[in-house]
Image: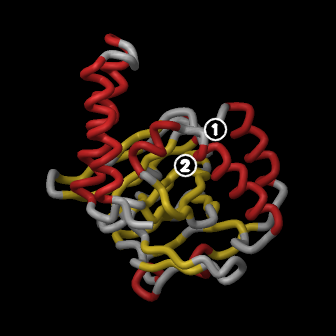
Amino acid sequence: MLICIPDILSKQDVADFRRIMDAEKWEDGRSTAGAQSAEVKQNDQLAPDSDVSRALGKRVISALSKNLMFISAAVPLHIFPPLFNRYVPGKFFGEHVDNCIRGDHLTGLRIRTDLSITLFLSEPEEYDGGELVVEDYYGAHRVKLPAGHAVLYPATSLHMVTPVTRGARVSSFFWVQSMIKDAHARRMSFDMDNALQELVTRLGRNDPQVRQLTNIYHNLVRHWAEL
């Protein structure tokens, strides 16, 4: 399930993020890569443990916690502290799969990486190349979204970032452990929630069938969820 989520951050927020990030020192992105990923990773990143990175990450998580589409799609249990990277001309990230477990030594948080997120912090016209390419059973999907928008996709997917040839691609990336481990069940809960919201718009929350379907939805999530 690959889902594009608009307007996680406002344009004003993005501009503020970029102003802060542009003043920081960037380091080799391979410092947070696994053994396999490090061989194909060529980018820069903010130091993950820096005060700036942590503060910006908290702002991202705060924004996500208010985004109903993200909550519905991810059903998040844990969100890994967001990281921030940059691709300038010649930089890329070859095909790889994310580590199945991620640990944060500052907080002690350890998560199973069910979902990966890329939050774009550059407008598409600011750079050439730099598409996120995610592979699934239906082929390869190329993603390049407006600044402030995010894409949520299975962490089990092979994916890559194509070489940047002009400008700079800046983004935040991180992972989510979902309350619903099973990807098929998580997709069904998302589809059902979307259908319910459409019915609420048409019939109102107090319609008897809407109440019944809402009850079924919550009982299914209650059955699937692991805390």
Marking on residue 9: 1
Query: Which picture quadrant has residue 189?
Result: top left
Q: Residue at x 49, y 74 (%)?
A: 111
Q: Position of residue 216 (x, y in %)?
A: 26, 40
Q: Is residue 20 left or right of residue 60?
A: right
Tell me how the rendering is colored.
Answer: secondary structure
User: What residue is shown at x 49% (from left), y 64% (from top)?
Assistant: 175
Within 10 Å of the Cα at label 2, are there few (<14), some (14-19), or many (20+) other Cα atoms? many
Which residue is drawn at the image coordinates 42% and 51% (left, top)?
A: 74
Amino acid type at mark 2: Leu
Disc 1: CA contacts within 10 A as few (<14), some (14-19) or many (>=20): many
Q: Rounded to the nearest whole Å, what is the CA distance between mark 2 and mark 1?
A: 9 Å
User: Eyeballing the image, is 29 above or below 125?
Assistant: below
Residue hosting label 2 = 119
Relative vertical location of residue 114 with respect to residue 126 in this rendering, above or below: below
Of mark 2 and mark 1, the one earlier in the sequence is 1
Q: What secondary structure is marked by label 1? A: loop
Note whether 69 is above or below 107 in the view shown: above
